[in-house]
Amino acid sequence: MIGQLLDGRYRIIRTLGKGGFGQTYIAEDTRRPGCPVCVVKHLKPASSDPRFLEIARRLFQSEAETLEKLGHYDRIPRLLAFFEHDSEFYLVQEYIDGHTLTHEIRRGQQWEEEKTIAMLKEVLSILAFVHSQGVIHRDIKPDNIIRRTSDNRLVLVDFGAVKQVRTQIMSMPEQTSATIAVGTPGYMSSEQGQGKPKPSSDIYALGMIGIQSLTGIAPARLDEDPETGEALWQHIAHVSPGSATVLSKMVKCYFRERYQSAQEVLEVLEKLDLENAVPETLIPAKPSTRIPTQSTPPRPLHPTRSDTPSWSRPIQSTPPRNRDGQPIPAIFPRDRNNQLLASVYSGKIPSRMKSTAVHPSFKPIVVQTVNTSGVSRVLVAICGGMVAIATTVGIFAGIRFGTPTSVTNSSAPIASPSIAGSPISGTSSSSIDPSMGVTSEIEHSAETGHMILAEAKAMADTGDYTKAIHIAGVIPSESMAYNQAQSAIAEWQLALGRQ
């Protein structure tokens, strides 16, 4: 046959396969530009009896029309031609360049569940179309599923319906009326083995392919349950309970216990996907794998709303008082500015502001502070990359800062600054005046009044007018916020009277 020209256009190039149903060849279409290759299937009847040939001809034409109808679907090879030559029958189909699933599902190698489910969905979508056309494939197996090279999609080939026609054509005349079993052992259901295939027979075969991919074991080699006759496989595969349930139902021995359509299986798998899906907002962030370079993890620069600050010893023996001589109550800080204010009002300072744990290998750059009308900013750059900025009240914690003198690049570890009179790295002890009280310094800082008033208003918003009045009362007359504070105090006193 090699080199022979069929129907005046299909030149046989090589043999693709040979079996009991006939032979399959690769041919080139000489009437099309570029002479593209195609597949030619040759069916030779077993008898030349005219009556038998007429029956065979009708069967062949009927099945060719079926393939023509199915070939309009992109995942099934198109039927290009069918013809009779010298009382022999030929089918010409589109050639699919790719490899079969047999090359992917290897013995002893187990697929991941996600890969198996994706394969099942892809083939089920093809079967849903095939079954909707009233056609049963009858020979679903890895060899008949090709992964197309051009787009990596799966294509279903070699329909068993045609194989049945081949068998009938190639059988003796007295056998043509008999229903012939077509399929492959291991993938063939019991009813198909009896010559009574149903759409669920294709589902059974596909389910066995799924199990084979998950276990790495061919269906015929799997053990069976002695009571049900069903394959025992779940103890071998790594699969979720939901997917295992679907596959088990696909391969039930009794066809009525299986899914009755490919579309039904698809819908169940889609439902499983939705149930297993986790919204991105619920996915916890991965913990950091960064290894700290400090022996003791540093505390955060700012407490969160749930943090409870740790306080050090008081700067003064007695808390500051307002103009009426009343102690200013300590308040719980709600943000960074409030924390600083709380330190001023309570006469205490957070312990983490006293010192910073720094790895000995770090080379700090200490920038001395600048006095800016009572509000100073201290910048400490560590390793040239980590910068901590603290905004503090002028002589926060009883310290008065002088004018900047220099920027020091030191290779020594940063000294832990002391609060009451000890020198801070980069400054001289003369720049610290421990005799200055917090209250007196606030009276010399006009800008601080706005911060205090904001805290007082926040306290009033909670309904605690007494504390709000006490807080606002500390604002000195020199402050730009003084008049606003007095007006607010008057309003809060009226509110107290109405309570």
Image: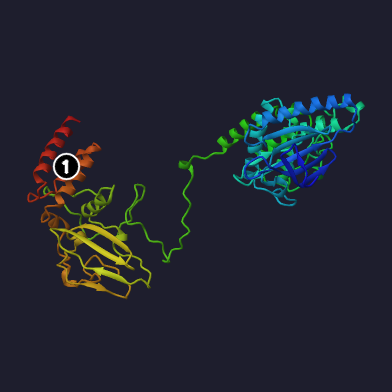
Determine whether the residue tagged by mark 1 lies in a helix, strand or loop: helix
Q: Is residue 225 visible?
A: yes
Q: Which residue is mark 1?
A: 469
Q: Residue drawn at (38%, 69%), measured in percent from left and top?
A: 359
Q: In the image, what residue occupies the spot 45% across and 41% down?
A: 281
Q: Position of residue 172 (x, y in %)?
A: 91, 30
Whether residue 274 sits left or right of residue 63 in the image: it is left
- For the N terminus, the image quarter is top right
Looking at the image, residue 399 sits to the left or right of residue 163; the answer is: left
Q: Residues within 10 Å of mark 1 (few under 14, many from 20)?
A: many
Residue 414 in view (yes/no): no
User: Residue drawn at (57%, 38%), measured in percent from left and top?
Assistant: 276
Residue 398 x, y percent position in the rendering: 19, 62
Q: Nearer the viewer, residue 276 or 458?
A: 276
Quarter of the image with the C terminus is top left
Under mark 1, the amino acid is: Ile
489 relative to 150 in the view: left or right: left
Judge whether 80 appears above or below 260 on screen. Answer: below
Compared to residue 97, the image places residue 21 above or below, namely above
Q: How is the image coloured?
A: rainbow
Query: Residue 20 or 100: which is nearer the viewer?
Result: 20
Q: Position of residue 432 (x, y in %)?
A: 17, 68
Position of residue 185 measured from the top left corner of the image (x, y, whole percent): 82, 39
Give residue 406's quadrant in the image: bottom left
